[in-house]
Image: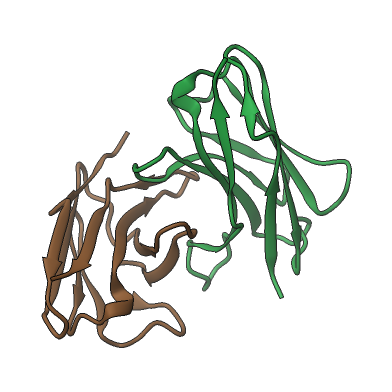
Amino acid sequence: QVALRESGPALVKPTQTLTLTCTFSGFSLSTSGMCVAWIRQPPGKAPEWLALIDWDDDKYYSTSLKTRLTVSKGTSENRVVLTMTNVDPVDTGTYYCARIRRMVGVPYTLDVWGQGTTVTVSS
Amino acid sequence: DIQMTQSPSSLSASVGDRVTITCQASDDIGDDLNWYHQKAGKAPKVLIYDASNLETGVPSRFSGSGSGIHFTLTISSLQPEDVGTYYCQRYGTVPVYTFGQGTKVDIK
């Protein structure tokens, strides 16, 4: 069964760097076509896609945030790490990781999501 | 960047009503569009992929249509468990996943 879980600090001060970890099971990021994406959702607002890392270690970022984001595979095979530099109170929200399968014949959907982790940016 | 605009932003309907939500892209996206449903405090779940295909396990009262710029999500007979917020989301050949601003649905 596929599952993802986000972890990281609940509270971060402005200008600090936020580091979040996505730990997943039930699939391998080494499998061709497999990807993990990060999405955030400010309170009461729509989700916003942040970044994606694929099976080939290619990385893609939101245009508006790419200078502040880094996505990488963790030291463990079943982890993906997102770092966001210079956080601001507007970065407050719930951060999700989700699986995407970019394979022929498979829908390009965020098909399995984690439960999300809430991050507050405040001094 | 291509923007996605949904309407209405919210609606209230009775159980059994037909509900229609629209999503407009700022440029032609073919049928590269998915629909999600999010209940309060939960992650979004896929309803429709590639504009008109029903995700496995999703009730048949949900349907999607459209291509190019204009897209529609229809609930043929609204049920109490359908409350929540609905989002359209486009995807690109180069990975990019843009969400609409959402339509909040509740029961009258």
Q: Nearer the viewer, residue A89 or A35?
A: A89
What residue is rendered at 67% in x and 20% in y? A17
What residue is rendered at 25% in x and 82% in y? B79
Chain A is shown in which shade? green
The residue sitting at the right extreme is A75
Residue A92's place in the image compared with B50, above or below, is above
Question: In the rendered view, how is the structure colored?
Answer: by chain
Quadrant that contains the N terminus of chain B = top left
| Residue B48 drawn at (x, y percent) | 35, 71
Q: Which of A51 and A10 is in front in this view?
A: A10
Q: In this view, does A89 lie to the left or right of B39?
A: right
Q: Can residue B70 be seen in this view?
A: no
Q: Is residue B49 visible?
A: yes
Tell me, by letter, which chain the rendering colours brown: B
| Residue A5 drawn at (x, y percent) | 69, 55
What residue is rendered at 69% in x and 33% in y? A9
| Residue B13 drawn at (x, y percent) | 12, 71
| Quadrant in the picture for residue A53 | top right
Quadrant that contains the C terminus of chain B = bottom left
Q: What is the tally of numbered marks visible in this picture?
A: 0
Q: Is residue B75 left or right of residue A25?
A: left
Q: Is residue B106 left or right of residue A60?
A: left
Q: Nearer the viewer, residue B70 or A1?
A: A1
What residue is rendered at 55% in x and 24% in y? A121
| Residue B26 drawn at (x, y percent) | 20, 41
| Quadrant in the picture for residue B64 | bottom left
